[in-house]
Every structure is written in structure tokens, then in C-alpha cells.
Image: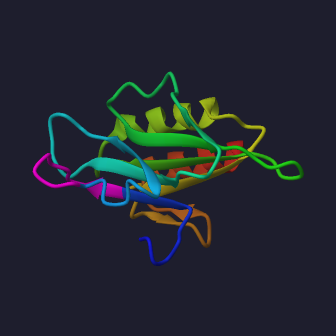
Amino acid sequence: MQLESYDLITLAETSWDEMHNWSIANDVYELFRRDRQERRGEDVVLYVKEWIDYTELSLKSSDGLVESLWVKIMGQATKGSLVVGVYYRLPDKEDDVDKLLLQLQEAPCSQALILLGDFNHAGICWKSSTASCKQSRRLLERVKDNF
């Protein structure tokens, strides 16, 4: 990570434990992580370079049941702010789609938004904006309606 000099790094579907020092870049990056308590391998991680002016967003709809992290990167004098989110959705977990959509609506909409992660919606073709199953169509329609 340090050799490439990335400003932001996101990881989804991680499995953290306390036996290892997972903050390997703690002298360069601030580490944020959201761990699912009852299951392993469904965590999300966000690294932000320490020199970047950012604020962690605590969305009301982040009830611990949806694995997501959000930060707002402050813009400079001539550039606007940027909201970045990382998300993990369990396969075939219907209610997570609604929770993600609530978070997207709650995220500050006056800034640009980038959402990364593992959506587990294999039925979506982002290139043609089509979806083969009901869940995927709902997500695709909501994204198209709101963004």
C-alpha cells in the first residue's frame, strides 16, 4: 500500500482478528473498520491518508446490521467535497438493499458520491442498466432515480 501511495483504500468481505496487527499502515493511514459481530468474513475497512482533511460520517440508518463505512473528504478552495462509502451485502439478503438505499439518501447529496464494495447483485449489468432479478432491479431503479 505504501509503495503505491493511494489516498483511499477500501476493502470488503474481510475477516479481522486481534492476533494480527492489521493496522499495518498506521503511520500513513487512518484505519476505519466495521465488524459484523455474529459472523466472520463480512467486515468492511476504509483507509484514509492521514494528511487528507476528512470527517467520518455516522449515518442514522447505520444500525450495525449493514456493513458500511462513510467518510466525507473536504474539498479545497475551488473543489467540492466528496463522500466515499464502502459496503458489503450478504448474498440474498433482501432487507439490506433497503438499508443501503436509506443510507444513500441520508448521505450528503450536495457533494459527489462514490460507493465501493461487494453488492452481491450478480444479476445487474451496469453497462446496459439491466437486471435479471427483483432485488437487483430494485437497487438499479433506486440508483437511477436518485443519482
Q: Which residue is rendered at x = 33% and y = 29% of the image?
A: 64
- On the rendered structure, is 127 left or right of 67? right
Q: Residue at x 52, y 47 (%)?
A: 85
Name the residue at the left extreme: 19
Task: Locate residue 99, reporting x and y percent.
Answer: 45, 33
Span colored in magenta:
12-21
Q: Quadrant location of residue 83?
A: top right
Q: Main secondary structure of the magenta part?
A: loop
Question: Residue furthest toward the bottom?
Answer: 3
Q: Nearer the viewer, residue 41 or 49?
A: 49
Task: From this view, report whether residue 92 is shown above or below residue 7.
Answer: above
Front residue (pair 81, 25): 25
- Quadrant in the picture for residue 102: top right
Residue beneath the point at 52% across and 41% down? 70
Residue 120 appears in the rendering: no
Q: Nearer the viewer, residue 6 or 133?
A: 6
User: Which residue shows up at 51% across the image and 52% down it?
Assistant: 137
Q: Is residue 17 visible in the rendered structure shown here? A: yes
The answer to whether 27 is drawn above or below residue 89 in the figure is below
**Residue 92 pos. (x, y %):** 29, 48
